[in-house]
Amino acid sequence: MKRFLHLRLEPGIIIILFILLLNACGTIRPVSKNNNTVKIEPVGDTLNKYFPDSNYVYKTDSSKTNEEYIDWNLARINGKLPMITNTKDLYKLLGQPDSIVTPNYDDVSVRYYDLKEFKYAYIKESQFEIYGDTAVISFLNFEKQPGLEFKAGTLTLNHNTTIAELRKLFPKAVKERSELLVDQMGRLMGISLATSKYMVDAAWLLFFRKNKLVRLDFWMPD
C-alpha cells in the first residue's frame, strides 16, 4: 500500500503500525514507484484481474477473509459519490478546490493510476488526485468540513464519530489502535481497517483527535 499521506512516524510506531496492517490487510506488497494515493491492490494468488484503466494486476485471495472491514465498493462521500468519481460531480458536492497542485513526479512514490499524470486538488484540507475528468479520493478531513460524511452501507462516519462508537462495530481494530504523528495535524490516534471482506493490500486509516474522527485515508503500499 501507499505510504501514509503526510505522516511522520516516530521510531517504534512504524513497527507497531506495520504489524497492525499485516493483521488487518494481509501481506503488504509494493505497488508502484510513484506516490501519494490509493488503489485497491489485493494480495493472494487465487484470483487475478486488471483494475479498470490501470496497468496494475488486481489480486485478491478468496480463501481468506477479514472479520472487520469497510467495503470499498460501498463507500460513498456524503452517501453520493464513490471513491473514484467524476471531477465535476466532486466539485459540485464539496465545492471548488482551494488549490490545485502539479506534483514533482520524481517525488511521487504511489498514485492511483500508475504512470498517468495527475494533479492534487485540495478542498478544505481533503486531498484528491485529479486525472482530467476523473477524481480519486486520497483522504478526507472531517475536522475542516463538519458537513462531510463517509458512508458505506449502514455505516456513517463524520466529525462526531467517536472511538467508543467505532469499538462497537470493529472491536479488534480499535484494540490495535496506536498513536501517530501526522504532518500538519500533530499527534492523532490511528485505527486501521481492511477495505474488503477478502485479504487485500489497501486499508482505511481513521485518525482521531480527542476521541473524535478528524481524518480518513485510503492507504496503499509503495
Image (cartoon, grey):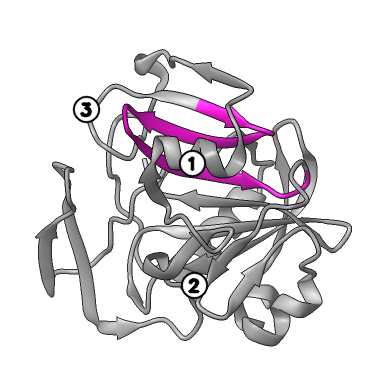
Mark drawn on residue 70: 2
**At numbered mark 2, what does the secondary structure look like: helix, strand or loop?**
loop
Q: Amino acid at mark 3?
A: Leu
Q: What's the CA distance linking mark 3 and mark 2?
A: 28 Å
Q: Position of residue 36 (x, y in %)?
A: 45, 34
Q: Which mark is residue 115?
A: 3
Task: Tell me residue 4's x, y (percent).
Answer: 54, 42
Mark-to-mark CA distance, 1 and 3: 23 Å
Q: Quadrant of residue 31?
A: top left
Q: Which residues are magenta?
A: 121-143
Q: Amino acid at mark 1?
A: Leu
Q: Residue at x 42, y 70 (%)?
A: 74
Tell me: 92 left or right of 44: right
| Secondary structure mainly formed by the magenta segment | strand
**Residue found at x 47% / y 86%:** 67
Q: Is residue 36 visible?
A: no
The numbered disc on residue 40 is none
Callout 2, which amino acid? Answer: Ile
Which element carries disc 1, helix, strand or loop? helix
